[in-house]
Amino acid sequence: MSAVALRAIIFDFNGVLADDETPHFLAFQQALAEDGLALTQEAYYGAYLGMDERNCAAALLDSAGGGRDLARLRKIMARKATLFQAYTATHKPPLFEGAVEFVKQAGARYRLAIASGGKREQIEFALRETPIEKDFTVIVSAEDTLFGKPDPAIYRLALARLNAAPPRPRPPVRPPECLVIEDSRAGIRAALAAGMWVVGLATTYPADQLAEAHAVLPGLTGASLDRLHRLFQSRDSQIL
C-alpha cells in the first residue's frame, strides 16, 4: 500500500498560532468576580485544569452552594465573552514562538488554512501586520458553521474551500491528505471525525490529555516539518 501524500495543513488558531491564554483567563476571572466567585490562576491551572470554562464556572457555582443555576451560568459566560472581545479589540495577542518559522516553511510546500472557533475579526486582527498575514489560502471561523468543535463541520468546510481556491488542486485534496494542528481535545476529535491526521500541541493542556492525536508536540518552536511529514506518511503515533 503506497504512502498517503501530505498536501495541506490546517491550523487551529487560538492556542496554536496565537497565544491568547492569558487574556482568556483574565476575562473569565473578572466575569466570575463580578458574580461573587473567586478564581485564582493556581486553581485554574491546577484543580480545574482540563475543564472548559463553562464546566469550571459550574464547578465554582457548585462549591459556592449555587448549584446548577443555568441562568447564572449563562450570564457569567456571556459577560466573559464581552470582556474578552473588548480586550482583544485593542490588544493584539502575540504569536507563539516558532509559529512564523513553521508557517513559512509549511507554506512553501503545502496549502494552508485556518479552522478556528474564534471570530474572524479577531483572527484577522491578530494576523494583521505579522509576517504570516497572507500565508493562509483559507480562514474558516465561528461565523461559518452552525456547530462548533468537536463537530467536524469546520474542518470539512476548510478543506472544501481549500479545494475551491485558485489555483484549484488537481486532483482535489482528500481528508487523509490533510494534517491538522490542534491544542484541545474537542479540536482533535473534530479533525479525527473529518478523517484527517492530527498533531496536538501541549500549549494549553498537558500532553497526556491530547493522547487521541496521532502525534503530540510541546509547541511549534523547533518543530521539524520533515519529521512530521515522515510520521504522517508512516501513520505512526508518537509524543515528540
Image (cartoon, rainbow, N blue to C red):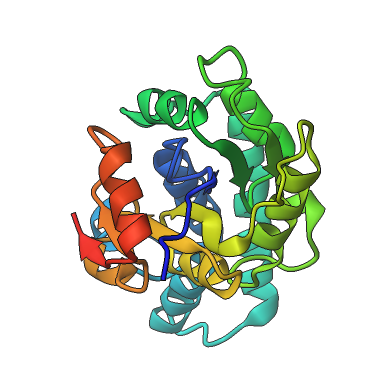
Quarter of the image for residue 153 reads bottom right
Quarter of the image for residue 168 reads top right
Q: Residue 232's x, y, as percent?
A: 37, 57
* Quarter the C terminus occupies: bottom left
Tell whether 174 sits left or right of 219. right
Tell whether 3 sits left or right of 175. left
Q: Residue 174's x, y, as percent?
A: 63, 59
* Quarter the N terminus occupies: bottom left
Quarter of the image for residue 233 reads bottom left
Q: Residue furthest front?
A: 1
Q: Residue 147's x, y, as percent?
A: 74, 68
For the question of whether residue 4 can be seen, the reply is yes
Tell whether 238 sits left or right of 111. left
Which residue occupies 22% across, 33% down? 222
Q: Residue 26's x, y, as percent?
A: 44, 44
Tell whether 140 sits left or right of 44. right
Which residue occupies 59% across, 25% down? 135
Which residue occupies 60% across, 31% down? 88
Q: Is residue 240 above or below residue 111?
A: below
Q: Is residue 133 above or below residue 138?
A: above
For the question of whether residue 44 can be seen, the reply is no
Total marks placed: 0
